Structure formats: structure tokens, C-alpha cells
Image (cartoon, grey):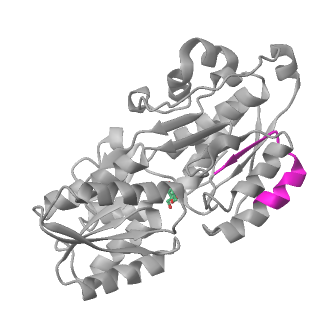
Amino acid sequence: MTKENSGRTRGWRFRLAAAGASAALVSATVLAGAAGPAATAASAASKHYTFLLIPGLTVDPFYITMHNGAAVEAAKLGVTLKWAGATTFVATLQIPVVNSELASKPDALLIAPTDEVALFKPIDAYVKAGIPVIAVDTTLANTSILTAAISSDNYQGGEAAADTIAKLAHDTGQVAVINVNKGVSTTDLRQDGFLFEMKKYPNMQVVATDYDQDSLTTAESLARSLILSHPKLVGIFGTNLYSAEGAGKGVIAAGDKGKVFVSGYDAEPAEITLLREGVVNILVVQNPAAEGALAVQDAYDAVTGNKSMIKKSVLLPNVVATQANMNDPSISKYFYSSTLTG
Ligand code: T6T
């Protein structure tokens, strides 16, 4: 089946299923469609395309898993997928990569902007050069220049994190958030969802929202000092992979396993170990492979003149992993890989 046929006749739910994602997981949060002129199949087939994927950082299993999903889809479509980025999640290091890669003139840019404002100009340079841009995972504050934006339901993930801690702590006690940086669209929303949900528990107080700059060691020391300075602390929400792993390690170091509960995000191997050990009590797991595959499909539609197939904004649902369900293959198949493939 050609890409054009699969998209046109069955829609994006089918496209995700074809990309290896469970169709049952696809949420109905499709906000708008975009329209554009149709190109001839002949001209699309005759050109070889190169898509550039710039992740938030190249060494994070979340983005590695996204890459692997994108690479499978790119191979199906006969597209070359290029991968470039910084090794830390910070706009000052991502921007030079975005700026310098423009010279290679990719046919499309797939990018996780590390700051929703600071990346606007560097990304707009691609758009001004006629290169379609798909935001994948994180996005920009001003999405008008984007062909599409694909992410997870970040707000819902934050709510689920709050409910888990509240339940384990019998709706009583103090909680804190360890977040990444202000201005990151995904983790800001997760924190918002957590803070909103916590308001439903009158006997619980949020005593801190701290930032670790995506550093595992900073997250761990933040967790340790939160525990020291707040004896009534019953829970920490780590809003992403390094924040959650650091929170778990801080709880271990303080000897507070089972007293301070941890809601975490993502599913790289060290987090899975912490979940198995009962240090982390819930992981909100995303589907980065499907995000990457969908981004490649959108980019392909954009460059082959099938813009009407593209949904401008897509949110994929999360999977919640706990100690009780983590060995179930329907859950564990979403755990992330640390190995780049494809
Ligand atoms: O949680 C993911 C991603 O969704 C977020 O935008 C940044 O952090 C991660 O990459 C995990 O480290």
C-alpha cells in the first residue's frame, strides 16, 4: 500500500497503527486539519527526500525511541532520515545546531524545540526557506509557522501523577514538583495539570516547584534537600525522565522509600528498575516511536502535496505503568530503548 493510499482512505488512525502504534491508544484530540494543493504521484515518486530530525537532546532514550519509530517509517517511504542535535536539553546548545543544519537544506524539519519562544526564529528560518516544519514532542508558543505539532497529553499526565500521590498518601501531606526548565511546552503542561489536580485535595499542599535543567544529579540533590527541609513531604512529581529518576534516587538516599511517594514520567531502563523496586510508584509513559512515525508521515504528506491529510495538532494518550502492571506486555511494549536503530 502506498503512503498516499493509506492516508487518504483510512485516515491518521490507520497511519499510526501501520507505524507500529496501537490504534486503541489513539486519542480523539485532533484539533484541526490543514488543506493544501495535491501534487502528482509521479513527481512525488521521482524525488528522493531527506528529513532532518532534531531532538531535545540526542542521548535521551525518549528521543532515541522517537528516532527509531521515525526511522522505520522513513525506510517504508524511501526517505533518508538525518539525526542531529545537542547532548543536553538546552536552547543555547540546540539553536546553533538548528542554525547550522539549515545549510544542508533538508526537505523537512522535524524538531522538539527546547524552548517554546527561543526556538521560534531559528525554526522560522526554515519556514522562510520553504521547508515544512513539524514540531514533535515539544512545540512553540506561536504555532502559526508549523505544518503540524505532535505531542502526548501532557496535562492529563500531570493530573494522573497528582492523583497517584494523593491516593498513596491518603489525601494528606505536602508534595513538590521537580521540573526541567520554564518555557518547555510539555513539562510546563505536566506541572500545570499536577498543580490543578492537587487543588482537589484540601489536605495536601504543594510546597515547592523546583527546576533541575534536565540534570539527573541536580534532580537527585533537589529531592534530597526537599525531603530534609519538608519533614511532612509525602510525594514528589518528576516531570520527565531525568527529573523522575533523580527524585527516585533522592528518596533512596534519604532512606524514605514508602514514605515519600514518587510519580514520574517516561520509561527508560533506570526508571523501570526504580518502579520495580517500589521507589517510583507510577510512570506516565509516552509513545515516542508513534510520535516520530507520525511526524515522518506528516512531513512526507507536506512535501508530496498531500497537506490535506495532515492534522495540525495531534495529542497521543499516555500509558500508566505501575509495579502491578509493568510486566504486562501491553504495557511494557511502550518502555523506551537506549539504542539508536535504523
Ligand atoms: O519527557 C520527555 C519529553 O516528552 C520532554 O519534552 C522532555 O523530556 C523527555 O525527553 C524525557 O527526558
Instruction: Please tell me in which quadrant of the rendered image residue 229 appears.
Output: bottom left
Instruction: From the viewer's perspective, tell me whether residue 152 is left or right of residue 256.
Output: right
- What span is in magenta? 98-111
Does 264 sit above or below residue 316?
Answer: below
Does 260 sit above or below residue 58?
Answer: below
Asked if residue 181 shows in the view, the reply is yes
Instruction: From the viewer's perspective, tell me whether residue 36 is left or right of residue 153.
Output: right
60, 98: nearer the viewer: 98
Please state the horizontal and vertical placement of residue 296, each as a whole percent of the image.
67, 36
Does 248 sit above or below residue 288?
Answer: below
Asked if the magenta segment contains residue 249, the reply would be no
Location of the N terminus (image quadrant): top right
Asked if the magenta segment contains residue 105, the reply would be yes
Please state the horizontal and vertical placement of residue 260, each as a whole percent of the image.
21, 73
Location of the C terminus (image quadrant): top right
Q: Residue at x 22, y 54 (%)?
A: 163
Q: Residue at x 66, y 21 (%)?
A: 308
Please state the horizontal and vertical placement of residue 293, each as a whole percent of the image.
60, 37
Q: Residue at x 56, y 52 (%)?
A: 138
Please state the horizontal and vertical placement of residue 262, each as a whole percent of the image.
28, 66
Q: Residue at x 66, y 66 (%)?
A: 91
